[in-house]
Amino acid sequence: MPQKFKCARCKTDLVVLKLDIGKFAACPQCGEWNEVPGILEPTGDSLNCKIKKKEHIKEILSENDEQSQEADKNIQTENTLPDKENKEIPEKAEIKDEQQEIEQDTNKEKPLSPDSATHSPQDNINITLDTGKVEVLMTYREYLKQITPHIYSTPLLIIINTLIFLLMSFSGVSIFTPELTKLLPWGIKYTPLILDNNEWWRLFTCMFVHIGIFHLIVNMTVLWIIGNIAERSYGSIAFTLIYLVSGLAGNVASLFLNAFVASAGASGAIMGITGALIPFMINKDLALPQHFTRRTAVLIILISGMSLGSGFIMNYIDNAGHIGGFLAGIGTGFILRKPLTPVDEGERRKKYIGVLGIGVLILITGIIGGNMFLKNVAPLLQIEEHWKNQEYEKALGVLTEHPEILSEVPDGQKLGAVIYGNAGWENYLKGDFERCISLSEKAFEIDPVVALYARYNIALCYLRLGSIKKSRDLYTELENADIKIEVENRNGAIQDLKDLIKQDIHADEAKNILLEIFKLKQDDI
């Protein structure tokens, strides 16, 4: 806020801003440097202010010398030397005494404050204040604190992420190895629900959900480190927009490039604010101090390097989200970066609206593109989930609802044959031999090579149903087939027959098949 006070010499009203740069202000009327305690708080840059005061005093001395020369001319013509000397010389002597005092202070080798010891001259930036026309010298870090005195978004985002994690843990979600089924209600990115149920809001909510306490701690630590710099550089509103739009872009990229992976976390958004520092640093209008750009560049390389490197090393880390967020952060950073001088608020608001529009466009792209190019992803993920749980009949149900998988998905024929074959075996274990035969024949029809083992299941079912001749004929055909049969499939068929002997189910028939067709010895049975 602007502060008013009066010049100690001429009583002119001065207007200054409350800057953390020292406690000296120059009067635009008489040039006097006024010490203003209580209005401008000292932070160790009083040396810079004294240097400026010294330069200003030199200007005053120069002006006084010109006035003295003019006065000498007037003395010669008007003979008024005593009064003029009594008025000018004491003032000139007073200024010289003050100049000598300042030179002694500035020539001291010991720094005046801790700040002056740690800041190099290149860290200083000239800022001209229109109010009062006071020119001051401040460090870049102090200027960042001036344009963004307080950061709100970074701590607020950390609180929100932590609070959601606590609520998840209280609801029964494991803090170390949470299960997918328990994470789904909290809004993680899961392609089947996004595409089939149109739950596109998951692309936004998943950036606030973390899978395990280690995941949360790492992300929040990095957010605090990089957020302090980025939020002060861009301001809280611009920083928040960059965070949200980058997180959304990262999740959309993950949807397309890692559709088969359920994911969550703030990594994409954090990579976005990291990338946003790049256009800020390379802005020539800012003329940033070299030490600031060097340190920030090292920080960007460390964060992006660790995030992307871990994604390439560990398969469970979603690198698509990292890359998408990083690129979105660079793009929004070019739009929202601001110069050191004040800018029109109306122009800023237009940029904010523009970035919001980009976020909406990214979401629309995800929706349209997802429905066009990812329509088979959701059923494939459902099949995969059923497969992990050995629910082959349910997997077959998904395949039946989406028969286009067989023709449109790479290796869809092989996938279909395996699903039908395993679903047939699941029915064999349930005692439904007729359905086992039906599904196994379908598997062999889809891909005879992949589903050759399914014919052993058919022969076994014939035996269980009492069709001994059909069973023997099929076993004989398989043993004499030109197609190379996998050893594990043949051994599996032999083991199935041995199990029937142990259970005394068609034991004599099974024993004869092993002896006569598979050529086993009596001791091997």
Image: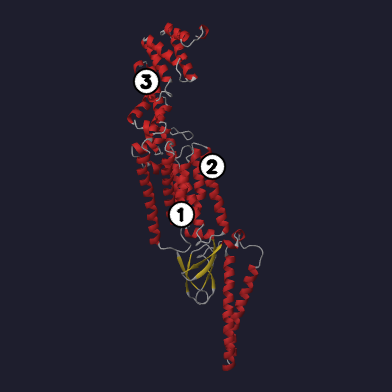
Residue at (37% x, 20% y) in the render: 441
10 Å crowding of disc 1: few (<14), some (14-19), many (20+): many
* CB within 8 Å, label 1 to label 3: no
Compared with residue 31, is residue 464 higher up or lower down, i.e. above or below? above
Compared with residue 288, is residue 313 higher up or lower down, i.e. above or below? above
Q: Which residue is mark 2?
A: 309
Label 1 and label 3: CA atoms lie apart by: 60 Å
For mark 2, give the secondary structure: helix
Residue at (58% x, 57% y) in the render: 291
- Looking at the rendered structure, the kind of residue marked 1 is Gly
Q: Decide if residue 351 is on the left or right side of residue 274.
A: left
Position in image of residue 81 (x %, y %): 59, 90
Label 2 and label 1: CA atoms lie apart by: 23 Å
10 Å crowding of disc 3: few (<14), some (14-19), many (20+): many
Using the rendered view, name the quadrant where residue 396 is placed: top left
10 Å crowding of disc 2: few (<14), some (14-19), many (20+): few
Compared with residue 402, is residue 271 higher up or lower down, i.e. above or below? below
Mark with earlier residue (3, 2): 2
- Looking at the rendered structure, the kind of residue marked 3 is Glu
Q: Which residue is mark 1?
A: 333
> Depth check: 306 or 58 in front?
306
Mark with earlier residue (1, 3): 1
Name the mark nearer the viewer: 3 or 2.
3
Q: Which mark is residue 441?
A: 3
| Residue 266 is at least partly visible in this image | no
- Looking at the rendered structure, the kind of residue marked 2 is Gly
Q: Decide if residue 72 is on the left or right side of residue 359.
A: right
Position in image of residue 511 (x %, y %): 45, 7
